[in-house]
């Protein structure tokens, strides 16, 4: 059985910090003349002589060396075995379709990523779904009879948090598995598997890759059977990532700790400045449970009087691009209600701090206000 190092530790027992782990994750051994991070391997079929399992690489829908390097890196950071997918939604769908069968009960947060709700209501035929809000007691009260408990913490866009360890203990007692959407915190901010969750899912499109130029998803777990089932799903559904994208994500990992630290500081500074002006603010620092996170993440939500006022402020910001998604190196923001998918007022702005200087972001936003 594979022994997974606890986050903060390495397999040789030395303790490394977050940045060190992110920089070195998944790199090949030091070898004379070899590149530090090998380039992407573009291949549909690979040479495969003899039986179908003669080598790990046979066909590009099943495995690829560039994915393998990224998966090794993510596995180290999450403390489990990681599989990469074409997008966060491909990772969501893989998890739900692999774990759940007709007749099962799914407990899921209704204030999380809308795509999860769409798949749960439109595709999980015969699965009984119980919606809860991101609140530890409410989730714990719903776990009886569940096969899977799906949580997102901090949740998006209102940035509520719940206690992964408490939810996991209650779910396991009831015989349920726990999946955590770890997109916002990333495995550097929070390690769901170490806190007791069975599955950590992530959209790496956001902070993990961080440059607003690729889509990627990942699922991590310590359950070997689940890893095999997820691989079969990935191959059957064809929800695979291209080698170039996987390589870009691996390359971006090296700066994850720096980006997360800077964008978290930016979001915290923006939250503080808005609160000082008496504006209603949503930020993970509002909740005691967030103490389990190293960094709060790049997001802050706030509410302006109306749709018109919110659009006007977005238009006046010089450093903030009006765009969806989050976790990129450039600050972005949007009026979240425009999608019609989240229970937020028309003047609710979801703001994602980039890695700009926090004081510049604060000055820019206060100027726009
Ligand atoms: C964006 C996002 C997803 C979906 O990821 P894609 O890469 O866009 O498919 C899932 N969960 C959360 C929390 C997200 O922010």
Image (cartoon, grey):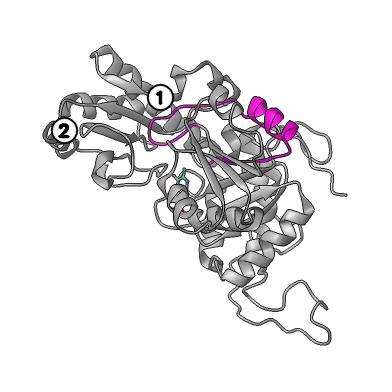
Assess disc 1: are there few (<14), some (14-19) or many (≥20) residues with their C-alpha within 10 Å of its C-alpha. Answer: many
> Where 28 falls versus 295 (above or below)?
below
Residue carrying label 2: 313
> Where 14 falls versus 325 (above or below)?
above
Farthest residue, direction right: 1
Instruction: Kindly tell me whether residue 341 is visible in this rendering.
Output: yes
Disc 2 within 8 angstroms of ligand 1 (CB): no
Residue carrying label 1: 283
x and y percentages locating residue 219 in the rendered image: 62, 51
Quadrant of image for the C terminus = top left
x and y percentages locating residue 35 in the rendered image: 66, 62
Is residue 193 left or right of 319 when viewed as pictured? right
> Mark 2 or mark 1, which has the lower sequence index?
1
Q: Which mark is residue 341?
A: none
x and y percentages locating residue 241 in the rendered image: 54, 65
Is residue 69 left or right of 207 when viewed as pictured? right
> Which of the 4 image quarters holds residue 263?
top left
Range of the magenta residues?
A: 154-182
Count of marks overlaid on the render: 2
> Where 256 falls versus 196 (above or below)?
below
The residue at the point 60 percent across, 80 percent down is 44
State the SS at label 1.
loop
State the SS at label 2.
helix
The residue at the point 19 percent across, 35 percent down is 317
Instruction: Kindly tell me whether residue 68 is visible in this rendering.
Output: no
Disc 1 within 8 angstroms of ligand 1 (CB): no
Compare residues 74 and 153 and report the one nearer the observer: 153
Q: Nearer the viewer, mark 2 or mark 1?
A: 1
- Is 53 part of what is drawn in magenta? no
CA–CA distance between discs 2 and 1?
20 Å
x and y percentages locating residue 261 in the rendered image: 49, 31
> Which of the 4 image quarters holds residue 39?
bottom right
């Amino acid at each position: 059985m594979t022994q997974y190092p606890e986050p903060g530790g390495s397999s040789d027992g030395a303790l490394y910090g977050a940045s060190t782990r992110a920089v070195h994750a998944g790199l090949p051994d030091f070898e004379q003349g070899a590149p530090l991070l090998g380039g992407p391997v573009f291949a549909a079929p690979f040479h495969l002589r003899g039986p179908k399992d003669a080598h790990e690489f046979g066909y590009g829908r099943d495995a690829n060396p560039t994915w393998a390097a990224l998966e090794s890196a993510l596995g180290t950071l999450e403390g489990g075995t990681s599989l990469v997918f074409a997008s966060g939604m491909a990772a969501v769908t893989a998890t739900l379709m692999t774990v759940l069968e007709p007749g099962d009960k799914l407990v899921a947060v209704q204030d999380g990523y809308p795509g999860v709700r769409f798949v749960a209501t439109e595709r999980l035929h015969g699965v009984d779904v119980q919606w809860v809000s991101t609140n530890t007691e409410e989730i714990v009260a719903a776990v009886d009879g569940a096969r899977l408990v799906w949580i997102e913490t901090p949740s998006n866009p209102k940035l509520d948090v719940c206690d992964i360890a408490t939810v996991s203990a209650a779910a396991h007692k009831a015989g349920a598995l726990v999946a955590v959407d770890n997109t916002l915190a990333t495995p550097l901010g929070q390690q769901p598997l170490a806190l007791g969750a069975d599955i950590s899912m992530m959209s790496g499109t956001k902070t993990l890759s961080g440059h607003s130029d690729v889509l990627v998803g990942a699922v991590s777990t310590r359950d070997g059977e689940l890893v095999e089932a997820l691989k079969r799903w990935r191959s059957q559904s064809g929800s695979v990532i291209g080698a170039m994208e996987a390589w870009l994500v691996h390359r971006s990992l090296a700066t994850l700790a720096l980006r997360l630290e800077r964008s978290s500081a930016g979001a915290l500074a923006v939250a503080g400045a808005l609160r000082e002006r008496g504006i209603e603010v949503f930020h993970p620092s509002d909740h005691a449970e967030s103490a389990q996170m190293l960094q709060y993440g790049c997001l802050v939500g706030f509410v302006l009087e109306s749709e018109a006022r919110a659009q006007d402020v977005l238009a006046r910001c010089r450093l903030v691009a009006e765009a969806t998604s989050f976790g990129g190196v450039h600050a972005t923001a949007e009026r979240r209600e425009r999608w019609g998918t989240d229970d937020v007022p028309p003047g609710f702005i979801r703001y994602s701090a980039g890695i700009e200087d926090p004081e510049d972001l604060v000055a820019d936003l206060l100027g726009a206000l």
